[in-house]
Every structure is written in C-alpha cells, then in structure tokens.
Image (tube, rainbow, N blue to C red):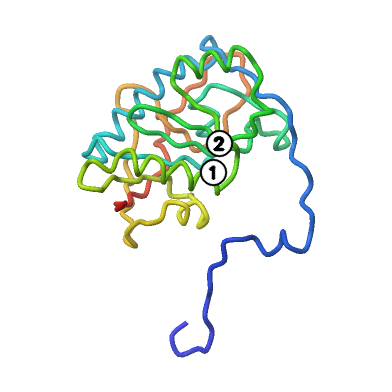
C-alpha cells in the first residue's frame, strides 16, 4: 500500500458482531472416541507430540497453540456431531505444554464420565472457550516459565488466526515456519484433515500442519 493514503488498523473486537446477534452455539455433548477405534490413547498422543515439539523448541519452556478443530478432536479422542454439520468436531482451542494440556471449550459440552476420566489421567484441564481465555492462559504459563531468563517459546499452527496470535503478545514480530512436523515412528501426530466416522482404526500418513514459532519475553 506504499504511496496510497490508506492505512489498515487492526481491531480486537469483531465489528460484524457489533451490528448483529450471532446465533447461539450448540450445547451438544462430546462423545468419547475409544482406543478400539482411535488406535491410541490420549496420553500416548500427547507424549508423542511433546517429544517432537521439545526437539523443535530446544527448550523446556514452551507452549504450543492448536487452533485446528480436527487436530484437537484427534488429539483428545472425542467426537461431536452437533457443532458443524457433517463434520464431527467441536468449537475449541487447545494449548499444550511439556507437562499439561488445556482445552478451551464450553464446559456444558463436556459431561461424559469416560472423557472426563481420560482427560484427568492425561492432565487435560478445561477452560471456557474464547480468545480472551487463551490470552489469559498464555500469560499465566509465561509467568510460570519465566525462570529461564524471562523467556519461553510459543509455537502455533500456521492456520492460527490474527486474534489468536495477538493473544500471545508480547512476542517478537518475526515468525519462523517449521514445515516438517511429524512423527517418524507412527502416523502423523496432528492430522490437518477432518476426522472421519469409522468402525475401523483410522490411518493417516500425511504430515501435520506446519507450525509458527515465536520467542516471547515476560
């Protein structure tokens, strides 16, 4: 836009939402996706992702943001058939650290005892859905990990929205894309395509979504 008297100004609030009332989202329940169908437990998937991400981050102080609904659904072994027609995913965000996992989702959707027990065993905590909640969590993790000279590494999938990236501030303005993020010993740790309902074990040989890496100071 050089030479043109036009300036783009980012706004935090969605201006469209200011002039209309969005419809209420479904409160349909998450359903567990058992190991007999998924082929791998939630804990095992989290451990594999942490192993790969730790090598990429090259530090013990890191956080990985997951905006892709299919990836979250796959990782935490659940399905939801009420949020998006013909796609068994739920509106959510997720954040993964070396020791914990957070899912940002409407708590009213998570009442199944099998899911709650599975997540408790895998140290998965539930927080309300929303960019603001992600921002709060990122800041909290940043404070907890500030012992390493006040720095830690934030990683996010390339399809992360502007709002999600802004929620990670303060971060450096430079982003480095990592285009090879996959587990060599098994199938991809974070499939980018939507999960398909199936009565047999799903196999995914595609590489995972590239991730962006941001160095943060707190």
Q: Position of residue 155 (x, y in %)?
A: 36, 45
Q: Which of the labelled discs sits on residue 70, or is there none?
A: none
Of residues 32 and 204, the one nearer the viewer is: 32
Q: Give the quadrant of residue 207.
A: top left
- The numbered mark, 1 or 2, whose residue comes first in the sequence reads 2
Q: Is residue 117 left or right of residue 46?
A: right
* Residue occupying the point 45% across, 37% down: 95
Q: Is residue 83 left or right of residue 147?
A: right
Residue placed furthest toward the top: 36
Q: Give the quadrant of residue 62.
A: top left
Q: Is residue 202 above or below residue 102?
A: above
* Residue occupying the point 44% across, 18% down: 122
Q: Could one spot residue 139 in this view of the protein?
A: yes
Q: Is residue 157 above or below residue 207?
A: below
Q: Position of residue 87 (x, y in %)?
A: 66, 34
Q: Secondary structure at mark 2?
A: strand
Q: Is residue 205 left or right of residue 110?
A: left
Per the image, the residue denoted by label 1 is 133
Q: Secondary structure at mark 1?
A: helix
Per the image, the residue denoted by label 2 is 104
Characterize the local packing of mark 2: few (<14), some (14-19) or many (20 or more) Cα atoms within 10 angstroms: many
Mark toward the viewer: 1 or 2: 1
Q: Is residue 164 above or below residue 4?
A: above
Characterize the local packing of mark 1: few (<14), some (14-19) or many (20 or more) Cα atoms within 10 angstroms: some
* Residue occupying the point 44% across, 21% down: 123
- Could you tell me if the residues under marks 1 and 2 are in contact, i.e. CB atoms within 8 Å? yes
Of residues 206 and 136, the one nearer the viewer is: 136
Q: Is residue 97 left or right of residue 67?
A: left
Query: How many numbered dots are placed on residues in this image?
Result: 2
Measure the C-alpha gap from mark 1 to mark 2.
7 Å
Q: Give the quadrant of residue 130.
A: top right
């Amino acid at each position: 836009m050089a030479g043109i008297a036009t300036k783009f100004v980012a706004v935090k609030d969605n201006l469209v939402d200011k002039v209309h009332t969005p419809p209420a989202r479904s409160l349909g329940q998450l359903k567990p996706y058992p190991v007999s169908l998924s082929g791998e437990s939630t804990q095992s998937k989290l451990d594999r992702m942490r192993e790969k991400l730790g090598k990429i981050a090259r530090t013990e102080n890191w956080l990985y943001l997951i905006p892709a609904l299919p990836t979250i659904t796959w990782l935490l072994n659940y399905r939801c058939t009420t949020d998006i027609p013909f796609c068994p995913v739920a509106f959510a965000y997720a954040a993964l650290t070396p020791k914990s996992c957070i899912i940002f989702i409407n708590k009213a959707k998570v009442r199944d005892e099998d899911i709650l027990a599975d997540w408790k065993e895998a140290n998965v905590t539930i927080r309300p859905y929303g960019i603001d909640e992600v921002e709060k969590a990122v800041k909290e993790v940043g404070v907890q990990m500030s012992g390493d000279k006040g720095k830690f590494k934030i990683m996010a999938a390339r399809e992360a929205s502007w709002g999600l990236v802004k929620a990670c501030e303060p971060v450096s303005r430079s982003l480095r894309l990592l285009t090879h993020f996959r587990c060599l010993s098994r199938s991809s740790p974070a499939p980018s395509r939507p999960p398909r309902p199936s009565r047999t074990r799903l196999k995914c040989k595609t590489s995972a979504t590239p991730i962006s890496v941001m160095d943060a100071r707190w």
